[in-house]
Amino acid sequence: MNAFPEAPFGPADSLELETVPLAVIRHDGIRIADLQDAFDRGYGAIGALFADGTLIPTGPALAIYRGDPMGVFDLELGFPVQAAPSAAIAAPDGARIVASTLPDGAAVATTVFGSYEELGAGWAGLVERAAEAALRPRGIWIEVYVSDPDTVPSELRTDLLMPVE
């Protein structure tokens, strides 16, 4: 099973993440209150590079949180791409689009259907199910936004991937 399956994940599917090239915008030391602005500006800047052919997407939008998502954390917003940028690309708004990779290794995953407000409960359930299997989070939390953000909120699909030890 890979990180970007056609079918939704079950309650706590195990998988082995493979390195995938990404184009991202990094935000260091941010909080939940900063997310809306980061998301709005970030995806638009990268999307413009798809429109002009600079980057070629190979999967849906994603966000990688590193650290404590309820406190201060680092964030990468971006997309899997055919080839990551070889050098930073400056966006018109001053953002820098850089190369990254999807973290590799063991992970558990689940799918949440519904509005983005449902994601907290989805994460709590995944952490609980992983603990029952004696798996511990590595401090990396990945959200894959499978549905277009214009989808009716009740039909949104978000895959949650949690690398584990």
Image (cartoon, helix red, strand yellow):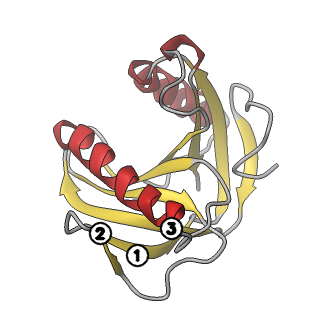
Residue, disc 2: 91
What secondary structure is marked by label 2?
Answer: loop
Q: Nearer the viewer, residue 130 or 59?
A: 59
The disc placed on residue 98 is 1
Asked if residue 40 is positioned above or below residue 111 in the image, the reply reads: below
Asked if residue 135 is positioned above or below residue 28 in the image, the reply reads: above
Left or right of 4, for residue 116: left
| Rendering coords of residue 116 (x, y %) | 43, 24
Please tell me which residue is depicted at 45% across the width and 26% down the height of the picture.
Answer: 119
Measured in 3D between alpha carbons, the distance from the residue under mark 3 to the one under mark 1, in whole angstroms, is: 17 Å
| Rendering coords of residue 49 (x, y %) | 46, 66
| Kind of residue indicated by mark 1 | Val
| Kind of residue indicated by mark 2 | Ala
Please tell me which residue is depicted at 71% across the width and 48% down the height of the picture.
Answer: 4
* Pointer 3 or 1: first along the chain: 3
The disc placed on residue 52 is 3
* Pointer 2 or 1: first along the chain: 2
